[in-house]
Structure formats: structure tokens, C-alpha cells
Image: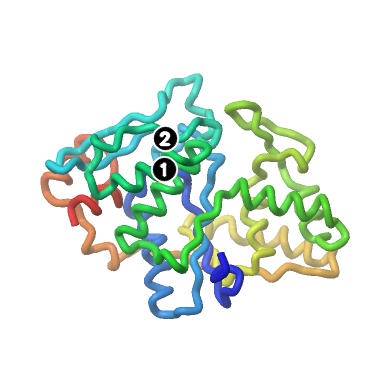
Amino acid sequence: MKRFLCAKKIFVTLPHASPNIFFPRAGVSKFVTDKQKEDHEIFHLRVVLTHTNFSDLGWRPYSWWYLNEEGVLIKQSIFSRNKKKKHYIISSQPPLLLDKQYYPSVLGHGIQLAQYADNLALSYIILQAFQEQLSGFSLAARTLYLPLDILILLMQTLARQQPGVHPWLLNLLTHAQSRKLNEYQLEDTHQWENAYVYDNYTNISLLFPLAPTAIVGGIKMQRYWPDIIDSVSIINEKTTTPCPIPQCLAFPQCQEYLLPYRPKQETLRQIQMADIEYSLAMAITEY
């Protein structure tokens, strides 16, 4: 935490809470880690989206795929993804409860730690951090994993308790589309103070008071980034304490740095049969 607070440069990435870190998404963290090795002033802030639900097909948080010690692809179901429950958000569920003896020993310690979390999203964040640090896809001393809902709670508290000190935040939040947590699912609310999460533009704009150097994303973020800048610029014009606007840094689509991490032939056959991508957990077992 001290290194984060004292960092001269902060690069932000925005993964979803999931035990699966599929390629090529895994490359985002590796991309920043390589930047950190070139520039020791860079700190990596991983703001993890904890409000996503079990219909998230990009990260598939309802199950965990990994290779056992014999190289067999295992699908460990964690949550029933039926029609009624697929819109339950991950952080509304209890923490991971798994018997580590069924997993490769190399992942056992991470699984054990994940079961001490308060909810499933936090369990997943622990698993993400464990996998990324074990594989060298993040640097332990220069990477901080921050749940988005905790960031939002912090910004809400500042805007509510010190509105005169934080007029920029207050202006942003009072114009946001707010959603609150109703037991397991999100629903709209007109009270920004009670929101669990906001619209995507606001969620990303809440990173700006942290003064990041860059927010790293893909092509999708590049498409809507100008809209975020437009809305932030309007707020900046209305306040005497404008917020600096970070760079939007796109990680390359042609990821040569991921070439060493390719599935072995038998693993490739299995993941093609399962219709999923290769993942960091699989790469850890194979390499």
C-alpha cells in the first residue's frame, strides 16, 4: 500500500472477478508487468470488477477450468448458471469452498487462502493474484488488487462527508446512473449514496482522482474513451479543482510476449473440445 501511495506512475487495469484468466486477456497484466520491468517507477493497480454476474461469458466465473497433475482438463462447477440465477452478481455469493486435494499442488496454497475471503468475488481476486504472481504475470511488491466496490465506497464517503473538499466527485456522482444491490442482483436507484456500482463511464471516471498515468484496455475501451473524456471535461469546467485526465493505453492485439505460453498439443485438443480458451492456471501446470 505504501508503494502505491508513493508511486510516481500508476497504470490501471480492469479485470473481472473470476478464477479463470483466459488468454489473450491474461496478456493485459503481462503487458503492464513488462512495462514495469522497463520503468521501475510504474506501479500496477488492478481494479477488479466485483459486480459482474454469472452470465459473463468472457470470464466464465461460474466454473473453473484447470489441468490436473495428469494433464487432464477438469471443469470444476462453482455456481449453478440456470436462468433464474445467472444474473446474480458474484460478490453476493459466499466464499469459495473447495477441497484443495482435487487441484494440482502448485495451486493448493492459493485455493486455501481464497476460502478465507468474505465473499466469492474476493475469493476470486485472491486466486487471480496468486496465479498472476506465481506465473510472473504480475510483480508482488508493485501490484495492488483493489475491488471496484471498495473504490466506489471510498469515493462515496469522501463526497458525502466532505462535499466542499471534493466538489468534482460530488458532481460526478450526482449525475451518475446508480445501481444498488438487492440481495443477489442489481437494481436501479435514484440515490447515488446507496449505489453499489454506477454506469461504466462513471466507474472508470472514479479512477481519475487517484491520478493514474494510464488506464490500460483493449479495442472496446478505445471506442468509448472519447465519451468518458467529454463527460469529465464538462465536470472539470464546472469545478475549481479539475481532475487530471490519464492516458488510455491499448495493449497490443498481436501479443508476441505471450508466444511462450501456448497449450501443448493434448491440452489444445481438450480445450477445443470444451470450447474454451487456454488459461493461466493451465499454463502454470504445463510450464
> Who is closer to the viewer here, 259 or 113?
113
* Percent x, y of residue 30: 37, 64
**Quarter of the image holding residue 243?**
bottom right
* Percent x, y of residue 92: 55, 32
Give the mark nearer the N terminus: 2 vs 1: 2
- Compared to residue 81, the image places residue 230 above or below, namely below
Kindly identify which residue carries mark 2.
Answer: 96
Is 264 displayed left or right of 106 in the figure?
left
Q: Is residue 125 visible?
A: yes
Q: How many marks?
A: 2
> Who is closer to the viewer here, 164 or 52?
164
Residue under the image location 40 percent in, 50 percent down: 128
Alpha-carbon span between mark 2 and mark 1: 6 Å
> Label 1 is placed on what type of residue?
Ala
Is 201 displayed left or right of 259 in the figure?
right
* Percent x, y of residue 203: 64, 51
* Percent x, y of residue 194: 74, 38
> Label 2 is placed on what type of residue?
Leu
- The image's colouring method is rainbow
Q: Quadrant of the C terminus?
A: bottom left
Considering the numbered disc 1 on the image, is that residue within a helix, a strand or a loop? helix
Residue under the image location 65 percent in, 45 percent down: 199
The disc at residue 47 is none
Residue under the image location 50 percent in, 70 percent down: 43
Considering the numbered disc 2 on the image, is that residue within a helix, a strand or a loop? loop
**Quarter of the image holding residue 271?**
top left
Kindly identify which residue carries mark 1.
Answer: 114
Q: Is residue 58 visible?
A: no
Disc 2 to disc 1: CB gap under 8 Å: yes
Q: Quadrant of the N terminus?
A: bottom right
